[in-house]
Structures are given as C-alpha cells and as structure tokens.
Amino acid sequence: MFKNPKDNNIVSRLIFHLDLDYFYAQCEEIRSPELRNHPLVVCVYSGRNPDSGVVSTSNYKAREFGVKSGMPIKIAKSKLANEDAEFLPIDMSYYNHLSILAMEFVRKIADAYEYVGIDECYADFSRYSGSDFSRARKIADFIKSEIKVSTNLTCSIGVGPNKLVAKIASNFQKPDAITIINPQEVKAFIARCDIEDIPGIGPKNRIKLESSGIESVSHLAKFDLFRLKELFGYKIATYLQNAARGIDDTPIRPHVSKQIGRIVTLKNDVTNIENIFPILSSLSSLVYDTLMTRQLSFKTIIVRVVLHNLRQVTCSRNLKLSSTSIEELQNIARSLFLEAIHLHSLSFLDVRRIGITLSDLSSYTGQNKILQYFAEGSRNGNQESNKNNKL
Ligand SMILES: [Mg+2]
C-alpha cells in the first residue's frame, strides 16, 4: 500500500513505540500477585533513615491517591496512611531480567530496534510489514501476547509513521493498549492532543507557549516560525513546529549510549570489606544485565568512590579485548575498589557512595551467552527466576 510500485522502495515508515506499563510496580505485582489489589509503591531508599528517599514508580491504585514518581516516600506514606498499601525497595536486577525477556522478542523480529530505557523501546517494522498499516494491529497483538506469555507483563504500543507519533500514541490510552495512527490520520491525531503530550513540552514550556498566545497544538503548528525561533532558539523552535505537525525524521538508533553505569549510596554501617564486596557484586550484576539487554561488550571498567566530604576517587582498567564476562567484571571491580582504597589511604568509613561504569562499548556479536541467559530464565519460569535474580 505504501510501496513505490516501480522500485519496491518503502515510502512510509511503520514505527512502533513500546512501553511496559507502570513497570517496576507491575514487576512486583507479578512476583506477588496478592499485591495487585493494593496501592503498591516501589521506592528508592537512601538508607539514611527508614523513610528517606523517593518514589520510583507506583501502580494505578496508588496513583489514585496522588502518589507520583519522584515524590518523597514520607509524602507518599501520608497520602496512603489509611490504605493497606505496600512499600517495596527497588530490585533492579529482577526488573532488568523481565525487561530483557520482554524486549528481546521485539528486538529479534523488528527490522531495527532502539533501546530507550528499561521499560521502553522503538522498533521499525517497515520492511516486516511492507509498510502496510493494516497489518500493524496483528503485529502489535502478537508482540503483546508473546510478552504476556514470557513475562506476564502488559504493555502499551503506539504505532505511527515516525518515532514522535508512535511515542505519543503509546501514551494515548495506557495501560494495556494499542493505538495505531496511520499516515493519513497523523494531522487530525496531533491536532487533538494536549500540548503537553508533545515530548519535551512540560509545564514550564506550556507556560512559555501560552504567554505567547499558543494554547493548542494546532495553533503551534501554524504559529509564525520566525517568532517561535525568537522565543526558543532555532533548534527547539523547528522541533516544536514540526512536532505539532506530526513531522519527525529521526531514525531508529540501534545503540545510543556510550557508557553504562550505576552508583549506590552506602548505609552508615558499611565499615569493612566483607560488607562492600556483596554491594560491588550487585552493582556488577546490574550493569551487566543492562549490557546484555543492549547486546554490548565492554572494554573499560571504572570504579568510582565518593567520600563523605564529597571528594571523588576513580580507578579504571582498559582491557586488551572487549569482554562479556561477568566474572571478569566482578573481579576487576573488586581489585579497582581495593586499588582506590590503598592508593588514597582511605578507610571504609570514608566511603559514602560507590559506582561502576562500563565504557568503550561495542556491539556484541556472540549469541551464546545471552541465549543461555534467556534459556535459564524461561526454564525457571517467572516465579523461580524471580528468586534467582533477586539481589
Ligand atoms: Mg513504562
């Protein structure tokens, strides 16, 4: 339908944006189904005191009471004071495992795949579908049911002729939904969106736009570009006007990140090496899981130590060859940490935060390791693999 009959070139792209619904909280509901009917809040505890930290994500039941991401745990607790609510610590290793299982399926069948985050990806299905939008629902249904079977997760999928429209569409009727916007519908679809539905427009930019009299997407679409450039600068103004018209030419970018890193704040009672090593191992597993999700190998490992006085000490090692070995990563992380302690004559009490970063990343070609990882996950089934992947 959208092919050029002469040379068979694809003339319209068919892009998916997939978003795993209320991801961390949904993962916890899968692990403990009895929590489904309760407000559930996944928290990043800073460890300073039992309630210090912020909300990472929450299920829809908790959202009904006004709980939001980024909110201090204390405030979330006060909002849910009269409810039988559950507050759980974040368990990235487990979420990573479910994310790998879910996203790997999309990555395998799509023409091109872009990792956006642990719960989000873009995928190009132009060739797969022959750019035939009438096939999009079947593909989306197929992906949703495969993800459901392998992980029990629900997701929302948006389909459009570009990344922008696909992203707005996936958010359009969350959760557990499919929204398909074919090329002929783009203009009308964008025009009925709220101005904050456009990625990059938040409350601040809305105010800025409104102060210039721009109150709707359709108004933004026809607003004088010269004046828009005066307000926002050339780059942003062009993006905004194109977005309001549903135009976006950005390609699917297979690998965008140059580094993968994680850092944690230590509790006050971490005073010796026996307590630090398990934390380094957990950090190694977290960065390794992300590395595997993106099918990358690493060549450089950096261990970062932040002291109580906020001074930073880093030690790094460059490998001769790219690696995908978690054992190598864990051993080097330990020795780099010890190197940092000895080189700078630090005591464990000085250490406030530690982090591991992998860089010099390149595409991972050997499939054995990752296939083995998936095979283990599916052999164990969801409940079993959850246990195995808990930190
Ligand atoms: Mg999500």
Image (spheres, grey):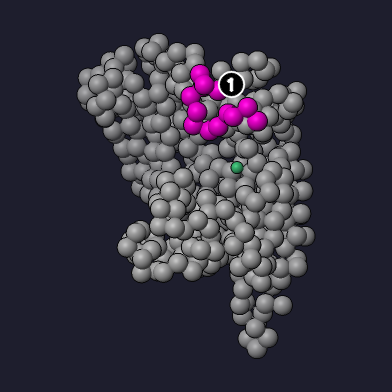
Residue in the image at 26% along x and 29% along y? 312
- Name the residue type under label 1: Lys
**Does the magenta stretch mainly form a helix, a strand or a loop?**
loop
Q: Which residue is mark 1?
A: 79
Give percent across and percent down for residue 180: 69, 60
Q: Which residue in the rendered view is the most extreme toward the bottom?
A: 6
Q: Secondary structure at mark 1?
A: helix
* Image quadrant occupied by the C terminus: top right
Side (left or right) of 391 relative to 131: left
Q: Is residue 216 visible?
A: yes
Between 232 and 97, the one nearer to me in the picture? 232
Side (left or right) of 387 relative to 69: right
Between 129 and 270, the one nearer to me in the picture? 129
Residue in the image at 67% along x and 25% along y? 39
Is residue 310 inside the magenta stretch? no
- Magenta segment: 64-76
Question: Is disc 1 surrounded by few (<14), some (14 to 19) or many (20+) residues within 10 Å?
Answer: some
Between 377 and 43, the one nearer to me in the picture? 43
Q: Quadrant of ligand 1?
A: top right
